[in-house]
Image (tube, rainbow, N blue to C red):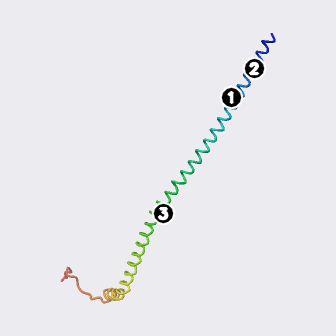
Amino acid sequence: MTSQSQGIQQLLQAEKRAKDKLEEAKKRKGKRLKQAKEEAMAEIDQYRMQKDKEFRLKQSKIMGSQSNLSDEIEEETLGKIQELNGRYSKCVESVLNQLLSMVCDMKPEIHVNYKGTN
């Protein structure tokens, strides 16, 4: 009976060691998964930063050319505004005189379609 009880004790100890090894393996697996996740996140962050840098370079090239175009358009617009202001100041007096003469110098005439009642 003692040999049976020793056999049972040995089986229980073997089962306990197996259970401990299994727990240890689960812990190692969890640590490895966590480490793999951290490594993947680091790679993702590095890739994201690289792509963000490439995007910013492309954006600066495009926006740089757009800002040059914008400057050219603004310069052209200012030139046209100055030209129009010059034309205005040159012609404003003659146009006002012409307008005033049309309004003030009235020559009353009978309309051609008017028929007398006599």
Vertical relation: 62 (above or below) 18: below
Q: Callout 1: helix, strand or loop?
A: helix
For label 3, count other residues whose C-alpha is less than 10 Å away and answer few (under 14), some (14-19) or many (20+).
few
Q: Look at label 1 and name its amino acid.
A: Leu
Number of numbered discs present?
3
Measuring from the top left, give residue 6's x and y in whole percent.
Answer: 79, 15
User: Looking at the rendering, in which quadrant would you find the N terminus?
Assistant: top right
Q: Residue furthest left?
A: 118
Residue highlighted by disc 3: 60
Q: CA distance from mark 2 to mark 3?
A: 71 Å
Asked whether the beta carbons under mark 3 and mark 1 sit within 8 Å of each other, the answer is no
Disc 2 designates what residue? 12
> Separation of disc 3 and disc 1 at Cα?
56 Å
Q: Amino acid at mark 3?
A: Ser
Crowd band around label 1 with a 10 angstrom C-alpha radius: few (<14), some (14–19), many (20+):
few
| Residue at point 56%, 48% (across, down) | 44
- Answer few, some or many: residues within 10 Å of disc 2's Cα (few below 14, many 20 plus, some between 14 and 19): few
Residue located at (66% from left, 38% from top): 31
Quadrant assignment, res 98: bottom left
Of the two numbered discs 2 and 3 on the same chain, state the one appearing first in sequence: 2
The image shows residue 20 at horizontal and vertical percentages of 72, 28
Left or right: 56 in relation to 117: right
Type of the residue with mark 2: Leu
Which residue is identified by label 1? 22
User: At numbered mark 3, what does the secondary structure look like: helix, strand or loop?
Assistant: helix
Q: Quadrant of residue 5?
A: top right
